[in-house]
Each structure stands twice: as structure tokens, then as C-alpha cells.
Image (spheres, helix red, strand yellow):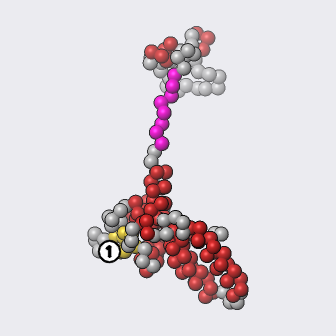
């Protein structure tokens, strides 16, 4: 099942708001952080506000925040709200095919029930863990097979290593001064 891009962006916006806690977040900042155009971000925030997922404060110091705790917002609820809006617009354009629409609607509902197992808080926690940098291990020196200059910390990238037979760069490498 493929969801529309607006639904994906709506979930990402809610996760961004969840990571901000109770602080108001400017829509322009959300747009920059998530790489969504400002126009689309405003449109999606409006949809989320009408659906009751975010509350908006207008004005110079305004912004948006979650209208309910992130743990109370199910991903399936968000998908239902956004997809129903998008599918209603598509249905207005289409003529006939009610049986097929019903079948697709049933399939979408089964798909969304799986999404109901997750909350925005779950997704915010997962994305926060993924955003933390992984610690980089220092390379370990094999002291048994290492050049004595490496062990002493005296080796430089330009210094010859391992005796006279290894002087100079490897074949095909040009050093520039």
C-alpha cells in the first residue's frame, strides 16, 4: 500500500513537534529541518490543526505544538485523517467505480490497523536514537607488525615507512608540494 507524500510529511511534522516537547515550533523551522517546502508545510500543518493533532498560536512568537501527548497520537489516526482528506478530493474527480473504491478502502483500513500499533512518541524516540552519532572507535595499532615510527607516534603521512625499500609514494600516487 502506498501512502501519499502529504501523509508521510504529516507524520514527520508530528514527530518533529514531539521532539520539541511543549515548546512552540515555527513552521518555517520545521520546513527547513525536514526539507519540505514552506507552502506544503503550512498546508499540512493546517490539515493537522483541523484534525486536532496540533494547536497553532499565531503572531510573532507563535508556532505549533502537539495538541495531545505524543503517546496518545496513533500513527494510524494521522494516516486516516490525512488519507481521507486526500481520497475525498480524488473521489470528487472520479466517476463510478464504487465497488473498487470500497475494496481499496477496506485494504487501506487493514493497513492502517497495523500502523495503530505505533504512536508518534514511539517514532520520536526511534528517530532521536537514530540521530545520535555512533561513537567512532580509535584505530588499534598492531604493535607486533607495526613500524617502530608508528609505535613512537613519530610517523607522518609524508615520512617513508619500513626502511629504504619503501621510500616514496606507492606506484601511481603523485605527491604535491
Question: Split into 4 quadrants, where in the image is the N terminus?
Answer: bottom right
Which residue is depicted at the point 42% across and 77% down? 52
Compared with 86, 25 (above or below) is above
Report the front residue among 150 and 169. Answer: 150
- The answer to whether residue 2 shows anywhere in this view is yes
- The majority secondary structure of the magenta stretch comes to loop
Q: Describe residue 74's horizontal placement relative to residue 62 as left or right.
A: right
- The answer to whether residue 15 shows anywhere in this view is no
Rendered image quadrant of residue 8 = bottom right
Residue 136 is one of the magenta-drawn residues: yes
- Per the image, the residue denoted by label 1 is 57
Compared with 121, 55 (above or below) is below
Question: x and y percent of residue 24 in the render?
Answer: 33, 67
Residue 97 is one of the magenta-drawn residues: no
Rendered image quadrant of residue 104 = bottom right
Q: Describe residue 97's horizontal placement relative to residue 129 as left or right.
A: right
Question: x and y percent of residue 144 in the render?
Answer: 55, 15
The part of the chain drawn in magenta is 134-141
Which residue is depicted at the point 48% across and 36% down? 136
Which residue is depicted at the point 48% across and 16% down? 151
Question: x and y percent of residue 97 in the render?
Answer: 71, 87
Question: x and y percent of residue 49 in the render?
Answer: 42, 77
Amino acid at each position: 500500500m502506498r501512502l501519499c507524500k502529504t501523509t508521510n510529511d504529516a507524520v514527520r511534522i508530528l514527530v518533529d513537534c514531539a521532539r520539541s516537547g511543549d515548546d512552540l515550533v515555527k513552521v518555517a523551522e520545521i520546513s527547513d529541518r525536514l526539507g519540505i517546502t514552506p507552502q506544503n508545510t503550512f498546508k499540512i500543518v493546517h490539515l493537522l490543526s483541523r484534525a486536532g493533532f496540533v494547536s497553532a498560536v499565531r503572531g510573532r512568537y507563535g508556532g505549533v505544538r502537539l495538541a495531545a501527548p505524543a503517546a496518545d497520537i496513533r500513527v494510524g489516526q494521522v494516516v486516516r485523517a490525512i488519507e481521507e482528506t486526500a481520497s475525498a478530493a480524488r473521489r470528487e474527480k472520479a466517476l463510478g467505480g464504487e465497488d473498487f473504491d470500497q475494496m481499496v478502502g477496506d485494504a487501506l483500513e487493514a493497513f492502517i490497523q497495523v500502523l495503530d500499533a505505533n504512536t508518534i512518541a514511539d517514532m520520536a524516540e526511534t528517530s532521536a536514537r537514530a540521530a545520535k552519532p555512533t561513537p567512532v572507535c580509535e584505530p588499534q595499532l598492531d604493535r607486533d607488525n607495526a613500524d617502530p615510527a608508528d609505535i613512537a607516534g613519530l610517523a607522518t603521512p609524508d615520512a617513508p615507512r619500513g626502511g629504504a625499500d619503501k621510500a616514496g609514494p606507492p606506484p601511481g600516487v603523485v605527491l604535491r608540494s
